[in-house]
Every structure is written in structure tokens, then in C-alpha cells.
Image (cartoon, rainbow, N blue to C red):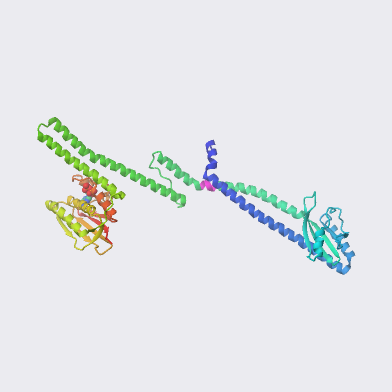
């Protein structure tokens, strides 16, 4: 690992996850150890207390049966048997003075607790206490109990073996814990690295993409976890950006192409007139042709702007109530003469009244664009039918069916794109913006346009619009 990477290590997510993992593991282990340690300590002390109480009970029975001498002998023998450094016994009178005891040479620092004797005399039952002998590390558990109304016994037991057990327990815990924390950090690091490797792949790809390689994608594994979902979403986003960029590129190519022809034409006409034109009429013709070309250009630019505004919601429908039948009739009347000229029959079947909320001017333009196409792409002898259905439903449908040249499957997906024109239509006048605008208007009114078509048999455009409430 390079020195830069090592310096950046504390800032990495994997490092912080590992720290958290090891830290939480260590904390939980310490809490568990403390609980276990407290439990063992109290169990050991409980056992010692039971032994001391049982011992006092035995002395009490012996005193009642065989007298103080027997108790004294038994105390000495039991202290020797258990080890004089482990237990001691003292027999006390009611003032706390010792009148007999086992060998106390090891225990000479231990005095009688006057407070405990007083409590005992007040009838509080056996007293148990833990004391530490100065200059010795281990503790002693001491019991004061009444053997009979005049004799008190003080029994002491060293807690050395318990202390040794707890010490061993602590040592084992520290050794095991040190090993386990290192292991936990290792496992944590491995898991964190695995988790963030997917994020790193996304970052890598994003870096490559911002460096210009838009075709790069994050490899997606079939696990379907959060990282794979992130990678899939990221790839989807890049796909969308790539499609948009391609569309923008195609559109600018189309705009450049469509602008170049009229501008070249205007320039050509002007040049020819300047070099060869002699009469006023030549100059008048040049001006007329320039105006015509400029009008066409302006119309194209205005339509582009209108599509953008309608799609962005800037050009909103006014929201008046529009009678659709009247709208269809007007459109048919408008195109009837053109259809007739082409020997194409145009029939309108719209009888039921239906109202939509919208902008009559925009809706008229939408219908006109589609009817214009129907007339344009239907050869002589063909038929066009315009009908209105669903007047009683929530949505109305205006269908414009023609028996024209039709549209191929591949073109069907693209005819609503700006500037898209099917190859067979290039001979016809047009800009490729009509359907884009029509669909933008339908969508701005909460509706849509769908199309079905068979090549050489005809096309059917269906406009759905929500009825006025
Ligand atoms: P244009 O100005 O070329 O008519 P449009 O956006 O209105 O542009 O239409 C896009 C393309 O869709 C047309 O160039 C044409 O190829 C195809 N098209 C539209 N309507 C029809 C139709 N009724 N019959 C056959 N082709 C059609």
C-alpha cells in the first residue's frame, strides 16, 4: 500500500466500520465479563458463608451436648485439619474477650469487631463481614455467631483460593480478549472491504465517465443486494444520460441540416441575383423567395420553441371548456378542400357531444398536424376517417385512420421524436416536428397519442383526452 493510501486510511469507511465493529465487540465482551465476574464472586462468597454458618451450627450443637471443652478441642482439630493459615476459630464471652481459640499466630492482626458483637447481642442473627489484613493481598471472611446465650464464636476463613480462581479467570479473559479483538478487527476489515468494494466500483466507473468514457458501466453481480441495486440504478442513470446526449446530438444535427438548406438557398438566390440579375423583377423575385424561406425557418423555430414550452409546462392550456365535436368538424372542413384536390375522401363521424378542459387553439393545432399528415401520406384514391368514441367514458378518443403509405415497425417508435422523418416521406414537405408538437399538446391536456400502422395499408392515430368534469 502506498504512503498516500495509508495516510487516507483513517478517513475510509472500511476503516471506520472496522473500528466500530471491533469497539462494539470489545465493549460487549467487557460487559459480559463483568457480569460473569460479579456472578462468580457472589457464588464463591455465598459458598464460603454457607460453610462458616454450618461450622457455627456444628459448634453450637457440640456445646449444647458435650460442653465448652469439646468445642475447644474440635476447633483446634478442625483448624489443623483445614490448615491453620486457612481458618481460625475464637470463642468469645459477651464482652468480646477471647477465652479460647485455635492457633492464632498467623491471624494475630485480626481483632474482634466490637460493633459486630454489639449487633449480635441486640439479636440481629449471625454477622458476616470481609476484612483485608494489612500487608496481605488476600481477604478474610469472618463470621460472628452466638453458640449459646453466653458464648460467641468468631470463625475466619481466608479467601485465598477464591482470589486465585478470580485472578486466573481475569488472566484468561485478558488473553482471550486480546486475541479475539485482533480477530474481530480482521473479520471486520474483511467484511467492511467486501461491503465497500461495490461502492468503489461505482466511484471508479463514475470517475471514468467524468473523464469522457460514457460507455463505461458498473459490473452488476446477480446477488441483488443494496450495492447491486445502487449499481443497477447508476447504470440506468448513465443509460438515460447517454440516450439524452445521443438525442441532443441527433437533434442538433437535424437542426443544423434543416437550417442549412434554406440558408444556402437564400444565399444562392441572392448571389445569382447579384451577379446575373438585371431587372427590378429579378430583385423582387429574390425578395419574395427570401421572405418565403425566412417564413419557413421562423415557423420551424417557433414550433421548436412551442414544443419545448409545452413539454416544460410553460405553455399551459388555458383550461376553457372545448366542444370536441365542433373542433373535429372545423378541422375536417379545413382539410376537405386539400383532400378533395388529392382525390382522397375525408369522412368525419363525430355525433355525440363531448367536452374537454383545455385550449381550443392548441387542440386545433394538434388535430390539424395529424390530419395534415393523413392527407399528405395518403395517395390519390385513398380514404381518411375521423371518429370520436368514448363520449360516455372518462376519456374520449379521437381516431384518425387513413389508407396511406403506413409506417414500418422500426419507424413507429421514433415518429414522435423531434425532426424524425421516415425515409419514404423525405420527398414530401415537412420538418419532422408536427407529431412531436401534437403529442406534447395531448400530454399537456392529460392525454396521449398512440399509433398503429401497417406499411402500404394505412395508419391509425388515436388521441385520448380526459373528459371535462
Ligand atoms: P412531417 O413534417 O415530416 O410530417 P411529423 O412529425 O408530422 O413530421 O411526422 C413524422 C413522420 O411520421 C413523417 O415524416 C412521416 O414519415 C411519418 N408519418 C406521420 N403521419 C403519417 C401517416 N399518417 N402515414 C404515414 N406516415 C406518417
Most extreme residue toward the bottom, as rendered?
65
Which residue is found at the position 19% from the left and 62% from the top?
351
Left or right position of 343 against 364: left
Q: Is 99 colored magenta in this rendering?
A: no
Q: Determine whether 281 is above or below 125 in the image.
A: above
Q: Is residue 61 left or right of residue 242?
A: right
Comparing 55 with 414, the one in front is 55
Q: Position of residue 247 (x, y in %)?
A: 31, 44
Residue in front for this viewpoint, 376 or 333: 333
Q: Quadrant of the N terminus?
A: top right
Give the percent coordinates (x, y) of residue 414: 27, 49
Quarter where residue 50 is shown? bottom right
**389, 97: nearer the viewer:** 97
Expressed as whole percent of the image width and height from the top left, the position of residue 418 reads 27, 46
- The secondary structure making up most of the magenta span is helix
Q: Can residue 272 be seen in the rendering of this structure? A: yes
Above or below, 274 against 358 in this view is above
Q: Is residue 353 above or below residue 23?
A: below
Highlighted range, magenta: 190-194
Identify whether 207 is placed above or below 275. below
Q: Is residue 55 visible to the viewer in this orientation of the structure? A: no
- Which quarter of the figure is the C terminus placed in? bottom left
The residue that appears at 23% across and 52% down in the rendered structure is 362
Amino acid at each position: 500500500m502506498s504512503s498516500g493510501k495509508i495516510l487516507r486510511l483513517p478517513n475510509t469507511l472500511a476503516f471506520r466500520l472496522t473500528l466500530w465493529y471491533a469497539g462494539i465487540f470489545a465493549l460487549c465482551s467487557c460487559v459480559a465479563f463483568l457480569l460473569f465476574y460479579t456472578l462468580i464472586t457472589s457464588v464463591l462468597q455465598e459458598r464460603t458463608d454457607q460453610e462458616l454458618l454450618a461450622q457455627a451450627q456444628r459448634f453450637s450443637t457440640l456445646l449444647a451436648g458435650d460442653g465448652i471443652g469439646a468445642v475447644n478441642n474440635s476447633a483446634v482439630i478442625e483448624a489443623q485439619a483445614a490448615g491453620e493459615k486457612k481458618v481460625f476459630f475464637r470463642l468469645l464471652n459477651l464482652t468480646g474477650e477471647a477465652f479460647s481459640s485455635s492457633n492464632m499466630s498467623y491471624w494475630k492482626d485480626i481483632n474482634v469487631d466490637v460493633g459486630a458483637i454489639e449487633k449480635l447481642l441486640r439479636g440481629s442473627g449471625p454477622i458476616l463481614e470481609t476484612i483485608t489484613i494489612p500487608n496481605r493481598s488476600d481477604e478474610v471472611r469472618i463470621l460472628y455467631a452466638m453458640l449459646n446465650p453466653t458464648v460467641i464464636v468468631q470463625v475466619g476463613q481466608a479467601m485465598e483460593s477464591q482470589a486465585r480462581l478470580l485472578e486466573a479467570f481475569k488472566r484468561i479473559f485478558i488473553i482471550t480478549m486480546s486475541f479475539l479483538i485482533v480477530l474481530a478487527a480482521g473479520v471486520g476489515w474483511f467484511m467492511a472491504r467486501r461491503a465497500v468494494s461495490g461502492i468503489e466500483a461505482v466511484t471508479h466507473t463514475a470517475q471514468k465517465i467524468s473523464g469522457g468514457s460514457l460507455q463505461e458501466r458498473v459490473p452488476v453481480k446477480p446477488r441483488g443486494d443494496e450495492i447491486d441495486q445502487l449499481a443497477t440504478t447508476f447504470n440506468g442513470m448513465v443509460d438515460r444520460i447517454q440516450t439524452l446526449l445521443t438525442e441532443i446530438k441527433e437533434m442538433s444535427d437535424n437542426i443544423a441540416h434543416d437550417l442549412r438548406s434554406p440558408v444556402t438557398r437564400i444565399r444562392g438566390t441572392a448571389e445569382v441575383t447579384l451577379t446575373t440579375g438585371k431587372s427590378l423583377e429579378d430583385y423582387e423575385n429574390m425578395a419574395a423567395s427570401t421572405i418565403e424561406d425566412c417564413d419557413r425557418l421562423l415557423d420551424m423555430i417557433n414550433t421548436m420553441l412551442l414544443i419545448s414550452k409545452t413539454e416544460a409546462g410553460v405553455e399551459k392550456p388555458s383550461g376553457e371548456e372545448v366542444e370536441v365535436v365542433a373542433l373535429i368538424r372545423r378541422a375536417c372542413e379545413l382539410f376537405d378542400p386539400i383532400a378533395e384536390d388529392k382525390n382522397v375522401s375525408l369522412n368525419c363521424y363525430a355525433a355525440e357531444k363531448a367536452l374537454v378542459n383545455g385550449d381550443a387553439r392548441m387542440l386545433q393545432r394538434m388535430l390539424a398536424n395529424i390530419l395534415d399528415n393523413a392527407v399528405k401520406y395518403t395517395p390519390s384514391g385513398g380514404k381518411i376517417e375521423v371518429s370520436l368514441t368514448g363520449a360516455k367514458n372518462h376519456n374520449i378518443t379521437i381516431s384518425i385512420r387513413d389508407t396511406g403509405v403506413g409506417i414500418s415497425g422500426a419507424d413507429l417508435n421514433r415518429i414522435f421524436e423531434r425532426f424524425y422523418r421516415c425515409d419514404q416521406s423525405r420527398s414530401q414537405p415537412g420538418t419532422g416536428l408536427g407529431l412531436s408538437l401534437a403529442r406534447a399538446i395531448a400530454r399537456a391536456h392529460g392525454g396521449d397519442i398512440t399509433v398503429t400502422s401497417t406499411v402500404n395499408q394505412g395508419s391509425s392515430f388515436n388521441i385520448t383526452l380526459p373528459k371535462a368534469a
